[in-house]
Amino acid sequence: MRSAQGVYQLYIDGKWVNSISGDTFAVYDPATEEVMAQVAEASAADIDLAVQAARRAFDAGPWAKSTPFSRAHILFKLASKVREQLASLAEVEAINTGKPIVEAEGDIDAVAEVFEYYGGLATKIPGQVNPVSSDALSLSLREPIGVAGLIVPWNYPLLMAAWKLAPALAAGCTCVLKPAEQTPLTTMMLAQWFEEAGLPAGVVNIVNGFGESCGVPIVEHPSVDKIAFTGSTEVGKSIVKRAADTLKRVTLELGGKSPNIFFADADWEASIDGALFGVFINQGEVCSAGSRILVEKKIYSKFVEAMAEKAKTIRIGAPLDRATKLGPVISRDQYERVNSYIAIGRGEAKLASGGGRPKGFDKGYYIEPTIFYDVDNTARIAREEIFGPVATVIPFDSEADAIQIANDTPYGLAAAVWSRDIYKAFRVVKSLRAGIVWVNHMQPTCVEAPWGGYKQSGIGRELGPWGIEEYLETKQVHINLSEKPIGWY
Ligand code: ADP
């Protein structure tokens, strides 16, 4: 996995290799700002090798003859390896991302579940017999799309990789996987166990590097059949444009500005808790973060006060401290970006709590949980994805008003509604233009249920049976049962 110089290498065609250029880049610990590893930096020539290996493995290698059962066994072995190594994977994930260790442990447990789920699903993808005329037999076969380019973000590094890798492998695809440049380490730990799990060389290749020099060559490579991407809406749009030349299939899970809607009749304690959890979990670096908190006017002032008071008690600390509930954000860039939005927010709205660097933290990209209120939905902090611990609280008058504000966004990933009135709650559920809607909760994510966005939050769905569909083609087969000539000429 590492060269003699201690550099984490690329994993191409079943081997650990340096990049062709010999270039490397540093990976940081966001709590200390120190370098935690050096990683080989891939560019177009390395991507070409990785894609060729994936192509060969798909077209002619043992993988091409693999059965759904054999693929299921590999996924189960990967799952048990992840469970066995959960503590070490979670520790590296927490240090590298800055997320609290308890959250990282939950993420890694979910990684194992994703491999288990798609291991189970691999043997349950039947084709179909189509009801055509009696002198023919018409079949629909489900076949893997081919070589899949998997491009992953830094907020849930191994989990987002697993969301793509597991269904791709279950379907029979081969892969070129690019972790985010900030967080490649746990994915490379996983790759150590590929051979032992029974994955033939070339089936999964891991390349590390930056968006333009490593991501773009995957998107543009003519031998890649499909791109699955999680990341910013801006990059998602550029991927659609670049993938158009070779008409690749594309699934995108992009940004959001998700509304978390609180009616006056909702359970009070659960609401305050849910408003904070919805936006501050994982330092707010969550595509589905409930970053627009819509509160009914009757309870609005009290709600803002209670949120601010409770936010001050959120334990900020080192990622490996088990009491920590909020760690540093991922990088200096992100720290500056979030702080620039806080500066914008000060001019657009009122500050209820936070807004600065927590006391006692001289190092690390720490930002206090920050709550703005009296935010107008036209404000930049209500429209643009901040991807950090910054909440915007917006008052509303009526059910219709709440729905109008909630849907007034270019995004449509997630939403939540809190009420004890099931008529009202379900009316709101049906009116929200979002791919995921929670009632009296925010953020639970289940591998069995579809995940993805409306509008500019993405294309396609991950997880559940929907997730594997994105890696399958459908082939129609028409079998003539009549022995007579067609007789046309
Ligand atoms: P974020 O803004 O959260 O860092 P990005 O969308 O920039 O998210 O990055 C998500 C993933 O996409 C990372 O692996 C990154 O390297 C990659 N990436 C960034 N730009 C491009 C691009 N133009 N084409 C393909 N991949 C890219």
Image (tube, grey):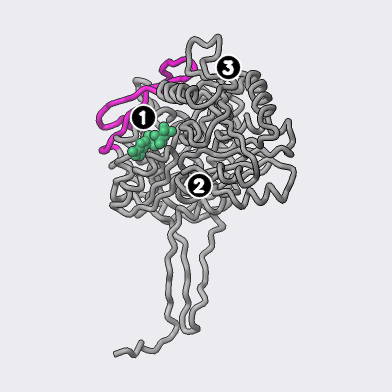
Instruction: Give the left or right position of residue 470, taking residue 246 as reference.
Output: right
Amino acid found under the numbered disc labelled 1? Gln
Q: How far from the left and from the top, in percent, is residue 131? A: 52, 76
Q: Label 1's element?
A: loop
What residue sits 40% from the left and 50% below the top? 250
Q: CA distance from mark 3 to mark 2?
A: 32 Å
Q: Amino acid at mark 3?
A: Gly
Q: Going from the N terminus, do you reach mark 1 or mark 3 first?
A: 1
Residue appearing at x 43%, y 19% in the figure: 36
In the rendered image of this protein, does residue 483 appear above or below residue 137? below
Q: Quadrant of ligand 1?
A: top left
Image quarter of the N terminus: top left
According to the picture, the residue beneath numbered tag 2 turns out to be 453
- Dot 1 or dot 2: first in sequence order is 1
Is the residue marked 2 within 8 Å of ligand 1, measured from its CB?
no
Quadrant that contains the C terminus: bottom left
Q: Quadrant of residue 79?
A: top right
Residue 19 among magenta residues:
yes
Q: Which residues are magenta?
A: 17-46
Q: Which residue is mark 1?
A: 9
Mark 1 and mark 3 in contact? Answer it, CB < 8 Å: no
**Residue 16: x and y, percent?**
36, 33
Amino acid bearing label 2? Gly
- For numbered disc 3, what is the local secondary structure? loop
Q: Nearer the viewer, residue 51 or 262?
A: 262
> Could you say which is closer to the camera, residue 105 or residue 292?
292
